[in-house]
Amino acid sequence: MHNSSLEVEVSIFDDTPRCNDRKTHKKPYFWSMEPQDTIKAQLLDSRDMERMLQRMARQLVEMFELDEDGGVSFGLVGMQTRGVYLAKRLQKIIKKVDGLDVELGVLDVTMYRDDFRMRGHQPVVKETRIDFDVDGRHLVLVDDVLYTGRTVRAGLDALTDLGRPASVHFLVVVDRGHRELPIRADFVGRKVPTLPGEEVRVRVSELDNEEGVWLVDHADVSTKEGDV
């Protein structure tokens, strides 16, 4: 699908760091928050994140019975943007601990969102790259925050345009509640009930130069990050 009004972002499928030299450009963790954010609490630090991803990788291996044969019918799909880095982490953990190579894809759902034409600014279309056949394969969508469920619905639509998977499951770091659609996560790192005006910020070192999960007050409740 081509639209000359869309801005296309360069690929982040490679391992190139998204930040400048950390030694010379290190910023405090609040630097990676939104301008309207007021931090209320840090919910997870980098060690918590690592332990959580280790646990979730083990859950994937056990649930899908991944081995040298089972891995060929399985794939991780990271949702832009932070879901991509989280999926790559899970892939590396499974490789390191179990010696298994699992397929990894990248999915952008901008054009599938139900509010696509309602937004007042030009959308940024990021990379979608799934180099394996999704037909008959068990897929796990990976993202950072589950909120309304609308971004996940868009992800399902995008995947079914590519083929007919055997199943699609959803893995998320934080479920913050307030669903607007009948969607749930199959693998949840942590459930964080939130109040109106509160949001959850997941930050990964590859992109944000910091690692962790924060609960924040956001001045403009009409602008939501991670509204999946």
Image (cartoon, grey):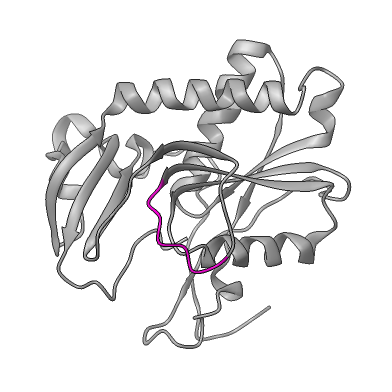
On the picture, is 169 further left or further right than 45?
A: right
User: In this view of the protein, which residue sits in the foreground, 150 or 105?
Assistant: 150
Type of secondary structure dominating the magenta stretch: loop
- Does residue 179 belong to the magenta stretch? yes
Foreground pick, 147 / 29: 147
In the figure, is residue 109 to the left or right of 192?
right
Which residue does the image show at 66% across and 12% down from the upper left? 98
Above or below — where is 144 with respect to 87?
A: below
Looking at the picture, how far across and down is residue 188, in whole percent?
49, 38
Name the residue at 33% across, 35% down.
205
Q: How many marks?
A: 0
Q: Position of residue 215 (x, y in %)?
A: 22, 47
Question: Does 150 sit left or right of 38 as displayed?
Answer: right
Q: Which image quadrant for residue 154? A: bottom right
Viewer-proximal residue, 4 or 141? 141
Q: Image quadrant for the N terminus?
A: bottom right
Asked if residue 21 is positioned above or below residue 228 in the image, the reply reads: above
Q: What residue is at 63 percent from the left and 58 percent from the top?
A: 128
Q: Residue at x 58, y 58 (%)?
A: 183
**Which percent across, then down, holds residue 115?**
49, 81
Q: Is residue 58 above or below residue 205?
A: above
**Residue 154 lies in the magenta-colored region:** no
Residue range (magenta): 175-181
Task: Indicate left or right for 129 with 115 as reference.
Answer: right
Query: In the rendering, at what x and y percent does residue 7 appear?
Result: 47, 75
